Image: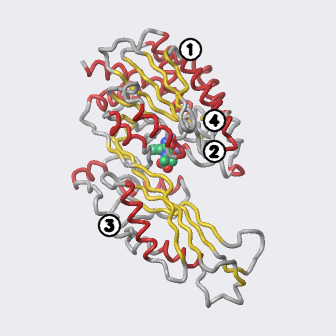
Amino acid sequence: MKDVTTYIENHKNRFIDELIELLKIPSVSADSAYNQDVLNTADFVKKSLEKAGCDNVKLCETPGYPIIYAEKIIDPNLPTVLVYGHYDVQPADPIELWTSPPFEPVIKKTEIHPEGAIFARGACDDKGQMYMHVKAMEYMISTGNLPCNVKFMIEGEEEVGSESLSWFVPRNREKLANDIILISDTGMIANDIPSITTGLRGLSYVEVEITGPNRDLHSGLYGGAVANPINILTKMIASLHDENNHITVPGFYDNVADLSLEERAEMAKAPFDVENYKKSIDIGDVYGEKGYSTNERNSIRPTLDVNGIWGGYMGQGAKTVIASKAYAKISMRLVPNQDWKDITELFKNHFESIASKSVSVKVTPHHGGQGYVTPIDTIAYKAASNAYETTFGKTPIPQRSGGSIPIVALFEQELKSKTILMGFGLDSDAIHSPDEHFGIWNYLKGIETIPHFYQNFTELSK
Ligand code: BES
Ligand code: MN
Ligand code: MN
């Protein structure tokens, strides 16, 4: 596979231009105003898989946005890799904080990406990373370097909970049958410290509503005599953590899979510079659950965070008012063995029970999913590890991530296959934030590394 670097060198400008075209389409799945753009993006992905040489490329209709399926079956006796990715993106808000428009991709140099990075919503999550697979496929098919069977399944609702994919997968078990699922939708430690993601956290996302009086009240006439829903809500939220930053929801930690001291010691070997970490996000100090390191807090430990909170008067100037209602959106990141439906129930019961009688509480679950830990004693892990070793010149470090891709647990349940997470993004790429970007070096390194995975996986499967 010596010619992969030559192929990339010869075609890299086109690879970059094509990704830029893909990034121009605002495929925001959360906002129905972008409905047509999401559909156009699906078409773009379909055409690019056709151009890459895949067979049977189909836009599969679902109750929501279409799923793109494609395949290249060269020999039923060879292993089959199923590539998953998503073509939808997060909303670009707050747009005013972007230094260039989110859907007008530009290449800019940064300290971490001296070769330049493409700035656009979805550059890293996940259009850039998904498209690496399309280009790796183009290389393998056009040069006769495809060593096994490959299937693609690219969805358009990952950022809103993958509802249609959950519908699609159990209905297409046969079509999706595979030996390993390959996903590039995570990150690595640094460009000179490659890592393979070995865990994802689960998620329970809820919205809470506190209702006090039946209308907004004058805060002078009624203030002091009536429960203020916003005051009550903030008190309730504050009570969800104790002085050690443990979550107080009864039963919350019951099923948490604790790591052994050996496993924690192994984890602690991963390079991490807390001063750099603080500097990169401008914070005075780190914060979190007592007894755990920063890397543990954001990967092997569960969390509870308010994602948004509102109510009352939020316009210009001052208005004296006790609002009738207060709201918050709360997410809980979960770890292996915590069941997201159980946790949602525990939260709901607890939150309702701690409210004072002077208000009423409504808890509405949004979406959620199970966490996932990928084994490292498998041929898939070995194949991935050797691939990085070849292209980065270093053995990658296994590392559990704090993010979530809830559909991965469902893949295992429905398709009985494991997933390998080969992510090439960096935490500093600002996914979900203003100025999201993806390093050109990372994009091309991904395209280079993927064919080695296929090759190694096929050989190790023999
Ligand atoms: N690609 C991310 C998840 C991710 C990023 C995992 C980096 C590990 C490292 C994915 O698109 C995402 O944003 N997931 C959501 C959950 C989803 C249900 C909205 C998340 O983690 O908040
Ligand atoms: Mn993603
Ligand atoms: Mn995302």
The residue where tag 4 is placed is 38
Marking on residue 251: 3
Q: Nearer the viewer, residue 319 or 435?
A: 319
The residue where tag 1 is placed is 10
The residue where tag 2 is placed is 435
Q: Where residue 360 sits in the image (x, y, percent)?
A: 53, 76
Q: Mark 1 belongs to which amino acid?
A: Asn
- Specify which label sits upstream in the sequence, 1 or 3: 1
- Specify which label sits upstream in the sequence, 3 or 2: 3
Residue 25 appears anywhere in the view:
yes
- Specify which label sits upstream in the sequence, 3 or 4: 4
**Residues at marks 2 and 4, CA–CA distance in whole angstroms:** 21 Å
Q: Quadrant of the N terminus?
A: top left
Q: Mark 4 belongs to which amino acid?
A: Val
Report how many numbered discs are placed on residues in the image.
4
Q: Mark 3 belongs to which amino acid?
A: Gly
Q: Where residue 305 sits in the image (x, y, percent)?
A: 48, 62
Q: Nearer the viewer, residue 86 or 16?
A: 86
SS of the residue at dot 4?
helix
**Residues at marks 4 and 1, CA–CA distance in whole angstroms:** 31 Å
- Residue depicted at x 67% and y 73%: 312
SS of the residue at dot 1?
helix
